[in-house]
Image (tube, rainbow, N blue to C red):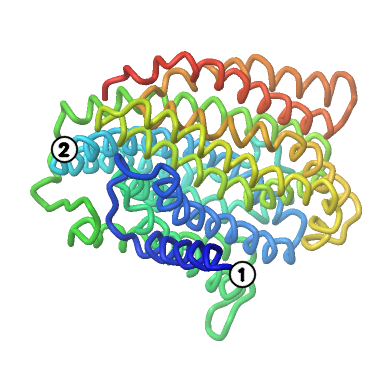
């Protein structure tokens, strides 16, 4: 190894340790490449941990029955509506907190954090009550068969009833990311999903005095894991172990800050509500082809999340850099950060797409040995992965709009690309023209490509640089 290569390796290893440890950094000055690295490593690891759990979870659930896998798929398609609100509020929290941190206003960042937590708790309680009372009806509306509903409604009840843990985990980690504490967000996910992975087989299959709960056990394990992590998040905020510290005195309603958050988050909520509701309708279309096809699709989505979540982590890096640099009055630095992040994300996604294209059957075969499940799951992987490079840029650019506080632009893009284009195309192709499941898979790919192209065109116009939050 040459001296130059040796020095680069040593520097890389030093930066890696600093990124994971969460060493304090000013991301509004210095090397942009280093800033991306220091933020993206913990963000990618955070999302990778989340997607790892999703894969492990489906491995355990797939050992129960096809109905159990389908139950998870239908329930999560409903949970995505919660994610829409959680992610919308999270985008607002990240944008406002990042802007305040860029302005060196930590007190303002703390105030915004508390109001975001209030808003999230209100939404979670409302949805939790509905999930506890109407789990069977929810699965029925999603097209679940009678046997599936009877086997899986308890899973739906527990996951929706305890959804406040999902909401808080999303929101508080968004606060950490906006502040530049990406490593703190990462370690809370390590705690949450590490517990999930340990508890999943215990509650699903039973151990000692703990009975085998089946698919219901997966929901119990998930809720406990997330609940413990949320407790840890609040401890970090209260003790000031990160860049933001909140106290009991901060937990009062501040209408001015809350209204500002709602104003920013409405676009984000609408944006993801459009996107996630389209996934609900796609899942409803897929249910027309039976539990085997639905199970294959569900497994493929879990597998894809293993790579999409790290890519989403890279996109969150761009959002934080945009927010903080706009706060520091450095819009050009913000824009350069976006293009560099997009390039790195595209390289990563290109490699992953090749793996899926060539090894789809083997990958899905790890989760099921039912021919129809494997065939449809593999087809889903191959068709959707064909557009991965476009996804890479689309994710980074749309998150950059959000990081700037411009949540309206991605909302409009999502409306036309998902509701006006994707859903009609999926229904016509799959049902009317009798393409079957491949019609749905193709609709997903074409819509994401369209989102990437439109987002890049609008981003280059630069109006996002003038947004105030």
Task: Tell me where residue 125 appears, x and y as whole percent.
Answer: 35, 43
Q: Which residue is mark 2?
A: 108
Pick the quarter of the image with the N terminus.
bottom right
Q: Secondary structure at mark 2?
A: helix
21 up-or-down from 339: above or below: below
* Position of residue 259 in the picture relative to residue 279 (left or right): left
Which is nearer the eye, 113 or 244? 244
Q: Earlier in the sequence, mark 1 or mark 2?
A: 2
Residue at the limit of the structure toward the left, as seen here: 249
**Toward the viewer: 9 or 197?**
9
In the image: residue 130, left or right of residue 216: left
Residue 121 in view, yes or no: no
Residue drawn at x 76%, y 49% as measured from the top left: 295
- Dividing the picture into quadrants, the one containing residue 68 is bottom right
- Circle 1 is placed at which residue position? 204
Report how many numbered discs are placed on residues in the image.
Answer: 2
From the top left corner, tell me how far across and down residue 117 is, in percent.
28, 43
The crowd level at tag 1 (other Cα within 10 Å; few <14, some 14-19, many 20+) is many
Q: Residue 122 at x, y = what percent?
A: 31, 39
């Amino acid at each position: 190894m040459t001296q130059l290569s040796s020095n680069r390796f040593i520097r890389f290893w030093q930066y890696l340790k600093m990124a994971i440890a969460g060493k304090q950094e000013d991301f509004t000055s210095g090397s942009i490449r280093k800033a991306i690295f220091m933020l993206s490593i913990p963000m990618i690891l955070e999302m990778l941990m989340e997607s790892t759990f999703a894969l492990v979870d489906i491995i355990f659930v797939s050992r129960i029955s096809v109905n159990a896998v389908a139950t998870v798929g239908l329930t999560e398609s409903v949970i995505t509506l919660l994610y829409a609100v959680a992610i919308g509020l999270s985008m607002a929290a990240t944008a406002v907190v990042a802007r305040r941190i860029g302005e060196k206003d930590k007190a303002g960042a703390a105030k915004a954090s508390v109001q975001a937590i209030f808003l999230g708790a209100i939404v979670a309680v409302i949805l939790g009550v509905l999930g506890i009372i109407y789990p069977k009806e929810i699965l029925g509306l999603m097209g679940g068969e009678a046997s599936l509903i009877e086997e899986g409604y308890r899973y739906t009840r527990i996951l929706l009833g305890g959804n406040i843990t999902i909401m808080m985990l999303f929101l508080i980690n968004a606060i950490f990311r906006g502040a530049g504490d990406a490593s703190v967000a990462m370690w809370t996910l390590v705690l949450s999903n590490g517990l999930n992975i340990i508890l999943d087989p215990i509650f699903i299959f039973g151990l000692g005095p703990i009975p085998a709960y089946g698919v219901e056990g997966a929901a119990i394990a998930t809720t406990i894991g997330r609940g413990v992590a949320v407790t840890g998040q609040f401890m970090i905020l209260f003790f000031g172990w990160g860049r933001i510290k909140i106290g009991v005195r901060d937990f009062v309603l501040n209408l001015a800050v809350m209204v500002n958050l709602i104003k920013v988050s409405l676009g984000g909520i609408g944006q993801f509500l459009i996107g996630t509701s389209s996934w609900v309708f796609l899942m409803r279309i897929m249910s027309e082809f039976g539990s085997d096809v639905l199970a294959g699709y569900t497994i493929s989505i879990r597998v894809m999340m293993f790579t999409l979540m790290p890519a989403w982590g890279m996109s969150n890096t761009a959002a934080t850099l945009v927010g903080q640099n706009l706060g520091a009055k450095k819009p050009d630095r913000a824009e350069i950060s976006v293009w560099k992040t997009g390039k790195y994300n595209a390289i990563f996604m290109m490699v992953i797409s090749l793996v899926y294209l060539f090894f789809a059957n083997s990958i899905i075969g790890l989760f099921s040995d039912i021919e129809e499940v494997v065939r449809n799951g593999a087809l889903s992987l191959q068709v959707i992965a064909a557009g991965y490079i476009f996804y890479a840029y689309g994710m980074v650019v749309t998150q950059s709009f959000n990081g700037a506080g411009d949540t309206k632009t991605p909302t409009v893009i999502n409306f036309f690309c998902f509701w006006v284009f994707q859903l009609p195309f999926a229904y016509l192709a799959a049902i009317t023209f009798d393409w079957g499941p491949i019609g749905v898979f193709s609709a997903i790919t074409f819509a994401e490509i369209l989102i990437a192209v439109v987002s890049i065109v609008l981003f280059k116009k630069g109006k996002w640089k003038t947004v105030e939050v």
